[in-house]
Image: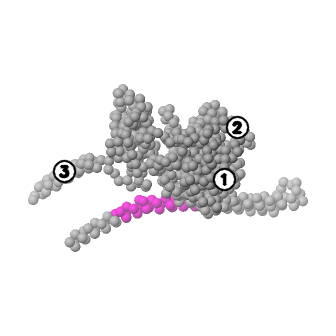
Amino acid sequence: MSTRSQKRLGASSLVLLLVAFVMAVIVSNQLFKGLRIDLTDNRLYTLSDGTKRIVRDIEEPINLYFYFSDRATRDVPSLRDYANRVREMLEELADAGRGKVRLSVIDPLPFSEEEDRAAQFGLQGAQLGATPDPVYLGLAGVNSVGDEEIIPFFQPEREASLEYDLAKLVSTLASPERSVVGLVSGVSMTGRFDPQTQRMQPPWAVYQQADQLFEIRDLGTAFDTVPEDIGLLWIVQPKNLSDTTQYAIDQFVLRGGKALIFVDPVAAVDSTSTESMPQGMPPVGQSSDLPLLFAGWGIEFSSREVVADAQLALQINTGFGNRPTRHYGYLGVTSDRIDDNDIVTMELGTLNAATAGRLRAAPDSDISLEPLVTSSPASALLPASRFAFLPDPTELQRGFDPGGEPLVIAARVSGSLPSAFPDGRPAMTPGPDDAGADEGSAAEHVPESTESVNLIVVADVDLLSDPMWVQVQNFFGRQIANAFASNGAFVVNALENLAGSSDLIAVRSRGSFSRPFTKVDELRVDAEARFLETQQRLQRELSETERRLAELQASRDDAGSLLLTDEQQAEIDRFVDQRASIRKELRAVQRGLDKDIEDLGMWLKIVNIGLMPLLLTAGTLIVLWQRRRRRDIA
């Protein structure tokens, strides 16, 4: 064969290979459309079992209308990519529904009937700078009886919660009837009038989330019976509840009712008025407890002790020293301190708590108290009084002595409970709230639960408040909540689990991408301990020098003279030199921390950039060598 023929054959082969490659890509795109391998931790991009159960149990068909301005977003590739992610998730929902979930994808062109229909649903068109026309990226769902649920606009910032938002919409349409939750709250969770701003404060974000899933009925804090249609009590900051009210709760639980209870030794969200406080001092949080119930049920909780933790301490801006300060009472509880075996807390991210208390079972109690959220071993109990007037949180670090054992902050309580009122109904004190008592208040006394109870008790109220876990923003006149911690997911998980519904729990808990640098946190805690020890030594040296100078001044015959003696001058010179040396040591401690973190980062880069490709290459070469060896032997 001539050289020219060989070149022609080579060129023809390349063309054929190129055509075959293009055809293979086209065919594979059609055959394997929607197929992907999820290699992320916790399989974040795989349809969860909870979502599959929700769509599998749908009895009547649900129509989903996905409105996306495809033509108007040609010059917005980032939004188009996210819209494609939403569409693929909807397609998976429809596929899992096996005909019970019907999906329609609609491009609402300007001034079209589709745009009018989107507006009728309540979907919102966003005005982006890259396009003159409004952009729609929302979802409307309609069930067989005409109930409607919408997601006005899919925000890319909430991609972590995408599957949960879709599953919740489908679940709500599939089961329109909502469970009734009785709210017993000593704080204004449902909104209140703020006399300082002369405006109504909106309800807490966690209350709004729960209100979307349940019918929440506010029972107040003074009642003598629980209505029969209520299956779950949500008790928050119960302050000074009467014996009659505690008896009603006791009998409700013993008859099979469920309860989610939040108490707190120092609830900053329920602060006393600042008018009676010294100027410049922070307000004092109030405590809450259920003393009769906890004592009778065998639950130990002290409203006089707060869990402090050196490892989980959060950095907060206090204005003291114009720098962020680690507050041992404000905890960012990481996933390794959260029970991943309980359906309520499995796969949650960080939970933020503030001045929480400790829970445990009484020694003579028969209850089962299973920890859900705990502190780290670097924690201890501090008197609640130390948090009353605390302008500088670093004061908590002085003399801090960790106990070496984790402390329980939230727990599930189960087992057979005796009544906290063994002698029966307490004497009722007549009052304005007693006029509405119904005949149910005279029901027969239950001395012991007939079946295993199911309670969840949390020794912190502040974790419910917005600043601890969510940032609420106004988006085109609509309040949008962007969570930076899993507090809301934990609370609604607990409500759903106690109310008897658990399909959404596994979906919601997947919505966190928080991956805390636990090793870096350990390095920082160790460095802070060394820094504080050196700082305290410097302070002791300073105090000792000042005392020595005072003694020298008092022992002089010419006490009124402003001139320093040789001995005083030598003492001052010695201290100046020593202070410079200690400050140098402080800087060395800080540099050591930075160096430890930089070294850790360097090793991570070496492993990820260098070692892993080498191992992959070596593994590939070994496999190829083994295949060639088998062919040679054959």
Q: Residues within 10 Å of mark 2 (few under 14, many from 20)?
A: few
Can residue 603 be found in the magenta stretch? Answer: yes
Question: Could you tell me how many numbered marks the image carries?
Answer: 3
The correct choice, above or below, for 467 with respect to 398 in the image is above
Q: Residue at x 48, y 33 (%)?
A: 476
Question: What is the residue that sits farthest to the left in this orientation?
Answer: 1
Disc number lying in front (3 or 1): 1
| The residue stretch that appears in magenta | 590-617
User: Furthest-bottom residue in view?
Assistant: 633
Above/below status of 566 relative to 137: below
Magenta-colored stretch includes residue 514: no
Q: Looking at the figure, which quarter contains the N terminus?
A: bottom left
Which amino acid type is shown beneath numbered disc 3? Val
CA separation, marks 1 and 2?
24 Å
Horizontal and vertical percent position of residue 368: 57, 58
Q: Secondary structure at mark 3?
A: helix
Residue at image coords 20%, 51%: 20
- Report if residue 199 is visible in the image: yes
The three-letter code of the residue at mark 2 reads: Gly
Q: Is residue 242 above or below residue 40?
A: above
Which marked residue is nearer to the observer: mark 3 or mark 2? Answer: 2
Q: Principal SS element in the magenta part?
A: helix
Q: Which label sits on residue 422? A: 1
Contact between marks 1 and 2 (CB within 8 A): the answer is: no
Name the residue tied to disc 3. Answer: 15
596 or 239: nearer the viewer:
239
Is disc 1 surrounded by few (<14), some (14 to 19) or many (20+) residues within 10 Å?
few
The amino acid sitting under disc 1 is Pro
Please tell me in which quadrant of the rendered image residue 359 appears.
bottom right
Residue named by callout 2: 431
Location of residue 535 (image quadrant): bottom right
